[in-house]
Amino acid sequence: TIGEALKFLILNGPGRTEKELAEAIFGDSAYQQRVNADCALLANRGEVERRGAGKPGDPYKYYPKEN
């Protein structure tokens, strides 16, 4: 699933933005909206950590959950 792919990418490349994650899954022309909901769900479940303000100058970046 997309969620599983996102978790794999975040664990193996922490600090990626939603745009970078979308491009890693769907290719260079991917839109970040394709992964927004899945990234938010992972963060809300506590499976990954989301940092940043979600704005153009400070986009959300995703990291493995720190214990």
Image (tube, rainbow, N blue to C red):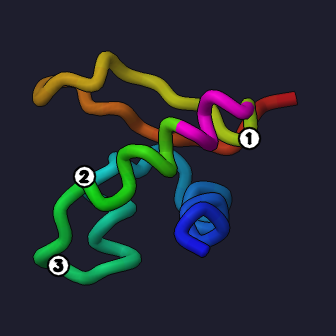
The alpha-carbon separation of the residues under discs 1 and 3 comes to 26 Å
Of the numbered discs 2 and 3, the one sitting upstream in the chain is: 3
The amino acid on which the numbered mark 1 sits, given as a three-letter code, is Glu
Marks 1/2: CA–CA distance = 20 Å
Report which residue position mark 3 lands on.
28
What amino acid is found at the position of numbered circle 2 in the picture?
Gln
Residue at 73% x, 31% y: name it. 46
- Please identify, in this view, whether the residue under mark 2 or under mark 3 is nearer the observer: 2
Magenta segment boundaries in residue numbering = 41-45
Return the residue at label 1: 47
- Which of 14/18 is in front? 18
Q: Position of residue 64 (x, y in %)?
A: 68, 44
Q: Secondary structure at mark 2?
A: helix
Where residue 24 appears, as percent x and y from the top left, is 37, 74
Circle 3 packing at 10 Å, graded few (<14), some (14-19), many (20+), is: few
- Is residue 59 shown left or right of residue 3? left
Label for residue 33? 2
Numbered tag placed on residue 37 in the rendering: none
Q: Nearer the viewer, residue 14 or 56?
A: 56
Q: Is residue 59 left or right of residue 12?
A: left
Tag in front: 1 or 2? 2
Above or below, 42 against 11 in this view is above
Mark nearer the N terminus (1 vs 2):
2
Q: Which residue is pictured at 36% across the width and 32% down the height?
A: 60
Q: Secondary structure at mark 1?
A: loop
1 or 3: tag closer to the N-terminus: 3
Residue 43 part of the magenta segment: yes
Q: Secondary structure at mark 3?
A: loop
